[in-house]
Image (cartoon, rainbow, N blue to C red):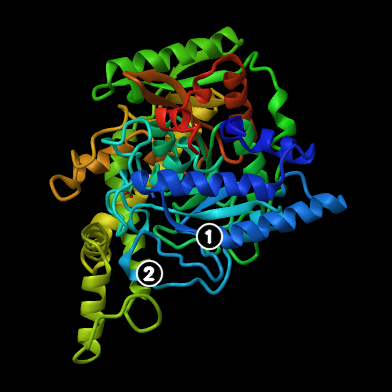
C-alpha cells in the first residue's frame, strides 16, 4: 500500500481497473495521510472526507458494474479558487471565509463527471495574488522539501499537497505564473493552458484576461490526463474557445527529432542563479541528444512584462473585486452605522494588505486622467510582447528557459510588506506568457542543494499537446520528476 502513494493518476487508474485496490481504500489512505501531515504543511484549508468517501464508493460501484470511466475513483484536490457546490470556497480570503458556493465551476463539474474523487480544497494566496502563499488568510503553506521555505504561489497549497503525497494531483490557476512557479519550487509538472482552452466559469476572478486553470501533477502523462478532462468549450464562459480538444494522451509518443527550440537570451541574463542556469542548460542538452536543435531568440520587450502586468492585473482585479461589498455575500462587518460604513468596514476588514494594494493601484490606473498614461500604455506593451512571441514562433517550435531565477526562498524573506516589488519580480520569466495568452509548462529539471529547479516550455496558441509530449519525452529519459521530498519518503511507513 505504501507504494501507492508514490503513484500518479495513470498508474493509480490501472491499479483500480485491475481491482488491486478500491477507490474507498485509496481515498482512506490519502485521508489518513492528510490528517497526519497537513497540520505541518497547511496545504489543505478544507478536507471533504465524507464527500470523498461517498464519491469513492460511487466509483467503486460503477467499476463493479463495468460502467466506470478510465479515471473513476482516482483522488485529487481542487485549489480553493474553484467554486464547489455545498463546500466552502474561500479563495484564501477572510472575505469569503463564510462562502459556501451554490454551484460547481465547470472544471469541478467535468472532473466529477469523470469520476475523480475530490479530497479537499487547497490553500492559496488571497485571491491568487502572490508568489509565496504568504498572503493567505489561512496562513502560509510550507514547502515539503524544506519547511522553512515557501512552496511558491499562488497555487502553493496544491503544489505542497502533491509534492508531499497528500494527493496524486491537484488543480491550480495561473494569472502570471501561479502554476509554473510553484511547480518549479516543489519539483512538479505544471501546465498553464492557452487562454480560452479551459473554462473560467465558476473560477473566482482575479484578472479575467489573464486567468487560466490548469494542473499540478507528478508527470506530463498525468497532466495530459487531467487537462483532457478539464479542457474544451463552455458556452457559460464567453472567452472559452470553441476548438476541438486533441487526444493529449495519444499525442505523447512523438520523437523530438527536428524540434526547433528557441532559447530567449533575456531569460539567461543578469539575475539568474548560475547554478540554475547550469541545470537548465544540461536539460537543453538532453533535448539536443533527442534530436532537437537550439536557436537563440530575442524577446525584446520582456523587460517590460512585469511592469505592464502590474498595471493590467490590478486594473482588472479592482473591477472584479468591487462585487465584495458586504451586502450580497461574503464578509460583513459587525454593526455597521450606515450603508457607507458597511461598505468601507466590510472591505477594510475582509481584504488583506496585498489585495488592498492591488485594488488601489488598479483603481488609480483606471481613473480619469491616468487611464491613457497607465492602462492604455500597458495594453500597448502587451501587444508588443505578443508580437515578440509571434516573431520567435516563426522560427522555432517552442521556447525554453528557467521557470524561476532561483530555487524556493525562505518564508518571510520577501515579505510583501517589506518590498512588494521583490515579490513581483518572482514571475519575471512567466508573466509575459500570460500577457500573450500562450500555453506554458514547467517540469523538474534538476536539484540544486537538494531543492527542485524547473524548466519552462512555452508554445504557440493551443500547442498543449506539443508541450506535453516534449515534457513526456524528457521524463522518459530523466528521473527528476520522480524525486520526492523527505516528507513523502520518510513518512510512508506512518502514512
Ligand atoms: N505572482 C503574480 C501575482 O501576484 C501571479 C499570481 C498568479 O498567477 N495568480 O499577481
In the rendered image, which residue does mark 1 sit on? 48
Q: Residues within 10 Å of mark 2 (few under 14, many from 20)?
A: many
User: 481 or 430: nearer the eye?
Assistant: 481
Q: Residue at x 32, y 78 (%)?
A: 325
Q: Secondary structure at mark 1?
A: loop
N-terminal-most mark, 2 or 1: 1
Q: Nearer the viewer, mark 2 or mark 1?
A: 1
Q: Position of residue 227 (x, y in %)?
A: 62, 44
Question: To which residue does mark 2 refer?
Answer: 96
The location of residue 116, given as percent across then percent down, is 66, 51
Seen from this angle, which residue lies furthest top? Answer: 289
Whole-percent x, y for residue 278 in the image: 36, 13
Q: Residue furthest left?
A: 418
Label 2 and label 1: CA atoms lie apart by 18 Å
Observer able to see residue 173: no
Image quadrant holding the N terminus, namely top right
Q: Nearer the viewer, residue 369 or 223?
A: 223
Mark 1: few, some, or many residues within 10 Å (few <14, many ≥20)? Answer: some
Label 2 element class:
helix
| Residue 254 makes an appearance in the image | yes
Compared with 454, 277 (above or below) is above
Image location of residue 432, percent across then percent down = 39, 39
Q: Residue at x 37, y 41 (%)?
A: 431
- What's the residue at 26%, 45% (across, down)? 307
Amino acid at each position: 500500500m505504501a507504494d501507492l502513494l508514490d503513484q500518479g493518476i495513470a498508474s493509480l487508474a490501472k491499479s483500480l481497473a485491475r481491482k488491486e485496490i478500491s477507490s474507498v481504500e485509496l481515498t482512506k489512505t490519502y485521508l489518513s495521510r492528510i490528517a497526519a501531515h497537513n497540520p505541518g504543511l497547511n496545504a489543505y484549508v478544507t478536507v471533504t472526507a465524507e464527500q470523498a468517501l461517498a464519491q469513492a464508493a460511487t466509483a467503486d460501484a460503477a467499476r463493479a458494474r463495468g460502467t466506470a470511466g478510465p479515471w473513476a475513483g482516482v483522488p485529487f484536490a481542487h485549489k480553493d479558487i474553484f467554486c464547489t457546490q455545498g463546500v466552502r470556497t474561500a479563495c484564501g480570503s477572510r472575505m469569503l471565509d463564510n462562502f459556501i458556493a451554490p454551484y460547481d465551476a465547470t472544471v469541478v463539474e467535468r472532473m466529477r463527471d469523470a469520476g475523480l474523487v475530490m479530497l479537499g480544497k487547497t490553500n492559496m494566496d488571497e485571491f491568487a495574488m502572490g508568489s509565496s502563499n504568504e498572503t493567505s488568510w489561512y496562513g502560509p503553506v510550507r514547502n515539503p522539501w524544506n519547511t522553512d521555505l515557501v512552496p511558491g504561489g499562488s497555487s502553493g497549497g496544491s503544489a505542497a499537497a502533491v509534492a508531499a503525497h497528500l494527493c496524486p494531483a491537484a488543480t491550480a490557476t495561473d494569472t502570471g505564473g501561479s502554476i509554473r512557479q510553484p511547480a518549479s519550487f516543489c519539483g512538479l509538472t505544471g501546465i498553464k493552458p492557452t487562454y480560452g482552452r479551459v473554462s473560467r466559469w465558476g473560477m473566482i476572478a482575479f484578472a479575467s484576461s489573464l486567468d487560466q486553470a490548469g494542473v499540478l501533477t507528478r508527470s506530463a502523462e498525468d497532466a495530459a490526463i487531467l487537462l483532457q478532462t478539464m479542457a474544451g468549450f463552455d458556452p457559460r464562459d464567453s472567452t472559452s474557445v470553441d476548438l476541438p480538444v486533441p487526444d493529449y494522451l495519444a499525442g505523447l509518443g512523438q520523437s523530438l527529432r527536428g524540434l526547433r527550440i528557441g532559447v530567449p537570451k533575456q531569460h539567461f541574463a543578469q539575475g539568474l542563479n548560475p547554478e540554475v542556469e547550469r541545470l537548465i542548460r544540461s536539460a537543453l542538452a538532453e533535448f539536443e541528444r533527442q534530436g532537437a536543435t537550439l536557436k537563440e531568440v530575442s524577446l525584446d520587450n520582456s523587460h517590460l512584462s512585469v511592469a505592464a502586468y502590474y498595471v493590467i492585473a490590478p486594473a482588472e482585479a479592482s473591477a472584479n473585486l468591487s462585487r465584495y461589498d458586504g451586502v450580497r455575500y461574503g464578509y460583513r462587518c459587525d454593526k455597521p452605522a450606515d450603508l457607507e460604513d458597511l461598505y468601507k468596514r466590510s472591505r477594510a476588514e475582509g481584504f488583506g494588505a496585498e489585495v488592498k494594494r492591488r485594488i488601489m493601484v488598479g483603481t488609480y490606473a483606471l481613473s480619469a486622467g491616468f487611464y491613457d498614461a497607465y492602462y492604455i500604455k500597458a495594453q500597448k506593451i502587451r501587444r508588443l510582447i505578443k508580437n515578440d512571441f509571434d516573431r520567435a514562433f516563426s522560427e522555432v517550435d517552442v521556447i525554453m528557459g528557467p521557470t524561476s531565477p532561483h530555487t524556493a526562498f525562505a518564508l518571510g524573506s520577501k515579505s510583501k510588506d517589506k518590498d512588494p516589488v521583490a515579490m513581483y519580480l518572482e514571475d519575471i520569466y512567466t508573466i509575459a506568457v500570460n500577457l500573450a495568452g500562450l500555453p506554458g509548462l514547467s517540469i523538474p529539471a534538476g536539484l540544486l542543494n537538494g531543492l527542485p529547479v524547473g524548466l519552462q516550455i512555452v508554445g504557440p496558441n493551443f500547442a498543449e499537446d506539443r508541450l506535453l509530449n516534449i515534457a513526456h519525452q524528457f521524463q522518459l529519459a530523466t528521473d527528476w520528476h520522480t524525486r520526492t521530498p523527505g516528507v513523502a519518503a520518510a513518512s510512508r511507513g506512518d502514512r
